[in-house]
C-alpha cells in the first residue's frame, strides 16, 4: 500500500508514527510524507527546517518526547556562545546535536543541492521505516517559501510570532513569501497521483497543511488524486490539541471546531475542485457533527483522537485508512 501524508510539526510526526505502525506488516508498504517548509528560515547563517527535523527525529526515535521538538539528551553550549556574540534569536534555542543537522543542511545547500536532496541525505542517517514499511520525507518545495504573520505591530516571521510571542498578539493575516513562484519538490505530485490513500495529518490547517496546499499545483493534485483523501481533525471539543492553531484559524475566519475545519478543507464529492475531503475523523466528543458533515458530502467517523503514544496514534491511522478504503 502506498500512503501519502501531508504533515507538519509535532502533530504530523506523531501521526506519521501511527501510520507507520498501522502498515508496518503489510506487503509493499510505502509512506511518503510531504512536509511543510513554511516555518523554515535562515538563522545565524544556517538554514533551519523545523518541521522536517521534528518529523525526522520522531521517526528515527531520537526526538525529545517531553518538549516535542529537538533531540533527546540535547545540550546547548553552542547556543550559549552564540548568545554571547549577539547572534541569532536568544529565545529560539538550537541544541548542539540539532545544530549538526542545520550545519549539514546548509553545507549541502551551499554545494548546490536542492532541499529535497539535502533532506534525503540527512534522513539517510537513520532508518525511518519499520517492519516492511518504507518511509521517505519530501519537502513540499525546494524553493524558499516562508510564512510571515501580519500583525498590528508589523510583519513577523511565523516562528517569532509562534515561539517568542506565543501567538499573543492577533494575526491579521498570513503571508507565504515566495509562494507564487514556487514549485512542488521533485516527487511530490507523483506521490499524490500514485498513492492508494492520501491523508491530511492533524497538523495546523492554516500554517502547516495550508502552506503545503498553497504551493502551486499541490492543492489541484490533491483535489484530482485518484486515491481517496481522508483528514484527521486537529481540534477536539472546540479546543486545539497542541499549540495555538486557534489563533491561526481566527485569522482566516474559521471557527475552532472540528466540523468547521472539515468544511474549510471542503468535500471533494460536491463537484470538481470544490474541496479536498472524501472522509474526516473527529473525536468522540464531536460525534454529533458526523451526520451534518456527511450531509455536506464528507463521511465522518468518530473515535478517540488524542495521540498519547504509538498505539493510540496507530489506532487513529488505521481508522483513517479504513475510512479511505471503504469510501
Image: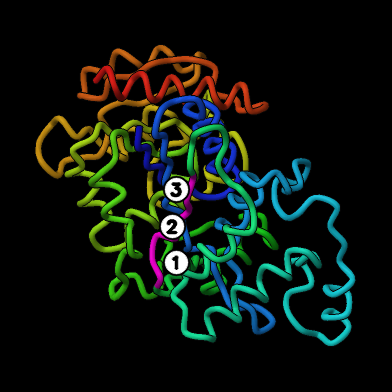
Instruction: Measure the C-alpha gap from mark 3 to mark 2.
Output: 6 Å
Which range of residues does the magenta coloring cover? 135-142
Q: Which residue occupies the foreground of this view, 87 or 247? A: 87
244 left or right, relative to 77: left
How many other residues sit within 10 Å of disc 2, few (<14), some (14-19) or many (≥20)? Answer: many
**In percent of the image, x 49 and y 32: which residue is there?**
19
Residues under numbered marks 3 and 2 in contact, where contact means CB atoms less than 8 Å apart: yes
Answer with the quarter of the image where residue 100 lies: bottom right
For label 1, the residue is 116
Q: Position of residue 73 (x, y in %)?
A: 85, 52
On the image, the x and y values in percent for residue 245 come to 53, 45
The quadrant the C terminus occupies is: top left
Residue on which the image places disc 2: 138
Report if residue 209 lies within the magenta region: no
Q: Decide: is 64 above or below 292.
A: below
Question: Can you see residue 260?
Answer: yes
Amino acid at each position: 500500500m502506498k500512503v501519502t501524508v501531508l504533515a507538519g510539526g509535532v502533530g504530523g510526526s506523531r501521526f506519521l508514527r501511527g501510520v507507520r505502525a498501522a502498515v508496518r506488516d503489510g506487503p509493499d508498504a510505502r509512506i511518503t510524507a510531504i512536509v511543510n517548509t513554511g516555518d523554515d528560515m535562515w538563522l545565524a547563517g544556517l538554514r533551519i527546517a523545523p518541521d522536517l527535523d521534528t518529523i525526522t527525529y520522531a521517526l528515527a526515535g531520537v526526538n525529545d518526547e517531553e518538549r516535542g521538538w529537538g533531540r533527546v539528551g540535547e545540550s546547548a553550549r553552542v547556543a550559549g556562545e552564540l548568545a554571547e556574540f549577539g547572534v541569532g534569536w536568544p529565545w529560539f534555542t538550537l541544541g548542539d546535536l540539532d545544530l549538526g543537522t542545520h550545519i549539514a543542511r546548509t553545507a549541502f545547500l551551499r554545494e548546490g543541492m536542492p532541499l529535497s536532496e539535502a533532506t534525503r541525505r540527512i534522513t539517510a542517517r537513520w532508518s525511518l521505516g519499520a517492519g516492511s514499511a518504507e518511509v521517505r520525507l519530501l519537502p513540499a518545495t525546494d524553493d524558499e517559501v516562508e510564512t510571515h504573520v501580519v500583525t498590528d505591530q508589523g510583519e513577523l516571521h511565523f516562528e517569532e510570532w509562534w515561539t517568542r510571542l506565543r501567538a499573543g498578539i492577533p494575526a491579521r493575516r498570513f503571508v507565504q513569501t515566495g509562494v507564487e513562484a514556487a514549485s512542488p519538490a521533485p516527487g511530490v505530485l507523483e506521490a499524490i497521483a500514485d498513492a492508494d490513500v492520501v491523508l491530511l495529518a492533524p497538523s495546523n490547517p492554516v500554517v502547516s497543511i495550508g502552506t503545503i496546499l498553497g504551493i502551486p499545483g499541490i492543492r489541484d493534485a490533491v483535489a484530482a488524486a485518484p486515491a481517496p483523501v481522508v483528514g484527521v481533525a486537529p481540534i477536539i471539543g472546540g479546543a486545539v490539541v497542541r499549540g495555538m492553531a486557534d489563533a491561526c484559524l481566527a485569522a482566516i475566519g474559521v471557527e475552532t471546531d472540528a466540523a468547521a475545519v472539515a468544511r474549510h478543507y471542503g468535500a471533494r464529492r460536491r463537484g470538481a475542485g470544490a474541496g479536498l475531503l472524501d472522509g474526516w475523523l473527529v473525536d468522540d466528543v464531536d460525534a454529533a457533527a458526523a451526520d451534518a458533515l456527511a450531509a455536506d458530502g464528507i463521511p465522518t467517523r468518530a473515535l478517540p483522537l488524542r495521540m498519547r503514544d504509538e498505539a493510540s496514534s496507530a489506532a487513529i491511522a488505521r481508522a483513517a485508512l479504513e475510512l479511505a478504503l471503504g469510501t
